[in-house]
Every structure is written in C-alpha cells, then in structure tokens.
C-alpha cells in the first residue's frame, strides 16, 4: 500500500484537529500550557496579551472602501451617484475601528500582591484586587430556543473594568466544559462562576475584606435566601483551594 505523503498527512491532521469538539481543543491547550490562557511572565506573575481580530476586519474594510473611492473618482461617477458616500463612511468607520482596536489588550495577574491589571499597550486602564476577575461558564445565544434545541456553552475570562475574553469554543458538553473551567480557575488561583446566577458549581477562592459582620461577596454577587453554603461546611482549602457557594451573580454584558 502506497504511503501517504507527509504534506498530505499534515493537512489531514490539521483537519482532524479543527473538527475536534471545543472541550477537546481546550484540554489540549491546557496540557501544553497549564496557565492557559495566560503565560508565565515571572515568579507568580501571569500575562495575557491579545489583539482583537476586529482590527484585521477594519483594515480590510479600509482597503475595500479606498478601492471603491478610487473606482468612483476615476470613472467620474461621483457627481452622478450618491452611493459614493457609502465607501466614504466606510473609510471613516474603518479608521475609527483601527484606532480603537490597534493597541494590544494586556491582562496581568500578580499572585504576590493578589492584584490584576488591564492595559492597552502601555496605557494602564485598571488595577484591582484579584477577587474582581474570574472564569465563567456562559450559554451562547442562538436562534432556536425550543425545549429540544441544543444548548451551547463556552468559557470566558472577565472582571471589573476589563474587556471580556472568550477562552474556549462552543460545546454542548456542559459538564466537561464546566470541569475544564474550574480547572483553569484553580490553575490561575481565580474564582469560578457557573452559567446560572445561583449555582452549587460556583467556586470562590477570594472574597473582599469584610467591612462589617459576616462575609462580603465579590461585586455582582449577593447571598440568596439561604446565604452562603460551603461545599463541605469548612473554610478556605489553602491558597488555591476554595468552597462552593449558592448565591446570586449578576449577569455579565456580552
């Protein structure tokens, strides 16, 4: 039997990898980098640097709009066709989008100071306590909402005054995606919140310092009628431990 050429084998492997379910791809990323989606910048300092894909869409839109303007002006259609305004608006919108999305978004987690920062290139936008950022499971909004329609879920890294980052693809395997989300949160020493506002799957590692009697929950979260419910009735299980709670978590935007 003739052997398959190496270049064809590489293509087939890429196709097979592309067709894997989202949870399988995420697990592969975690196996190669336990701190995913972050990278280790130094001892106990993790960094995530990303550039929006919308930047490339804006650049493409600018090129297309400029080409349309060149065609319109070279064929003397400007005075005869008001559609010339559309590529002109396209140029303006594309330039504004390029200006907005050009800086890289840089997220930093500092486990020594228990703080996070969010910056656009070298411009610092936010610095806060670690309890204000988290991993969360979210449900994807799709067209069909019937009882038998498949529900797709994905994971995000989000927090107070930071840009939300999607860190997984969509999957119907909510249990595996939840497990991986909790694993990511444990590896990064972050809080994990499930899709539902009130859930036994929330894992809380960091709380705000109490300002009055009782425990004060992170922003957007308040105790339900039953208050905080520990998974084992105990407290923290070490710096990377945590306890599950049943509480109310405000819905995120986006």
Image: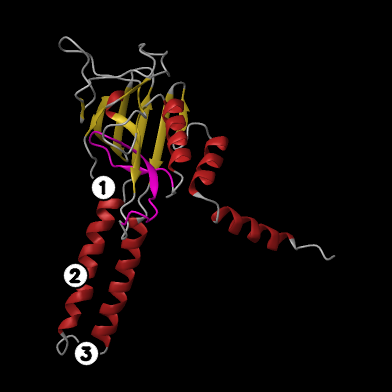
Residue 68: % across, % down: 28, 79
Going from the N terminus, do you reach mark 2 or mark 1 first?
A: 2
Q: Which residue is mark 1?
A: 254
- Residue lying at the far top of the rendered structure: 213
Going from the N terminus, do you reach mark 3 or mark 1 first?
A: 3
Q: Which residue is mark 2?
A: 89
**Is the residue 105 above or below the residue 211 in the image?**
below
Residue 164: % across, % down: 30, 42
Residue sitting at x 39%, y 46% = 153
**Is the residue 51 above or below the residue 8 in the image?**
above
- Residue lying at the far right of the rendered structure: 1
Q: Quadrant of the rendered structure where residue 116 is?
A: top left
Question: In what element is the residue under mark 1?
Answer: loop
Q: Residues within 10 Å of mark 1 (few under 14, many from 20)?
A: few
- Residue 154: within the magenta? yes
Residue sitting at x 31%, y 77% = 67
Q: Nearer the viewer, residue 165 or 103?
A: 165
Tell whether 52 sits left or right of 225.
right
Going from the N terminus, do you reach mark 2 or mark 3 first?
A: 3
Q: Which residue is mark 3?
A: 76
Residue 77: % across, % down: 21, 89
Mark 2–mark 1 Cα distance, whole angstroms, equals 26 Å
Q: Nearer the viewer, mark 3 or mark 1?
A: 1
Magenta-highlighted residues: 146-168
Residue sitting at x 20%, y 18% = 216
Tell whether 221 sits left or right of 203.
left
């Amino acid at each position: 039997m003739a052997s398959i050429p190496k270049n064809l084998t590489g293509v087939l492997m890429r196709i097979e990898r592309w067709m894997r379910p989202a949870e399988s791809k995420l697990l592969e990323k975690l196996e190669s980098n336990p701190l995913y989606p972050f990278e280790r910048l130094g001892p106990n300092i993790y960094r995530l640097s990303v550039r929006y894909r919308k930047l490339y869409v804006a650049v493409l839109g600018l090129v297309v709009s400029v080409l349309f303007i060149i065609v319109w002006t070279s064929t003397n259609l400007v005075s005869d066709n008001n559609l010339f305004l559309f590529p002109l608006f396209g140029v303006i919108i594309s330039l504004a989008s390029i200006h907005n999305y050009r800086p890289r978004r840089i997220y930093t987690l500092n486990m020594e100071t228990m703080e996070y920062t969010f910056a656009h290139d070298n411009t610092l936008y936010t610095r806060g306590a670690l309890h204000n950022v988290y991993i969360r499971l979210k449900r994807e909004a799709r067209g069909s909402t019937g009882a038998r329609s498949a529900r797709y879920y994905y994971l995000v890294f989000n927090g107070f005054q930071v840009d939300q980052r999607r860190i997984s693809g969509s999957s119907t395997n909510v249990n595996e995606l939840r497990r991986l989300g909790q694993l990511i949160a444990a590896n990064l020493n972050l809080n994990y919140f499930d899709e539902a506002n009130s859930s036994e799957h929330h894992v809380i590692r960091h709380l705000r310092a109490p300002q009055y009697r009782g425990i004060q929950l992170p922003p957007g979260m308040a105790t339900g009628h039953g208050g905080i419910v520990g998974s084992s009735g105990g407290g923290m299980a070490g710096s990377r431990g945590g306890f599950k709670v049943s509480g109310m978590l405000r819905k995120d935007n986006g």
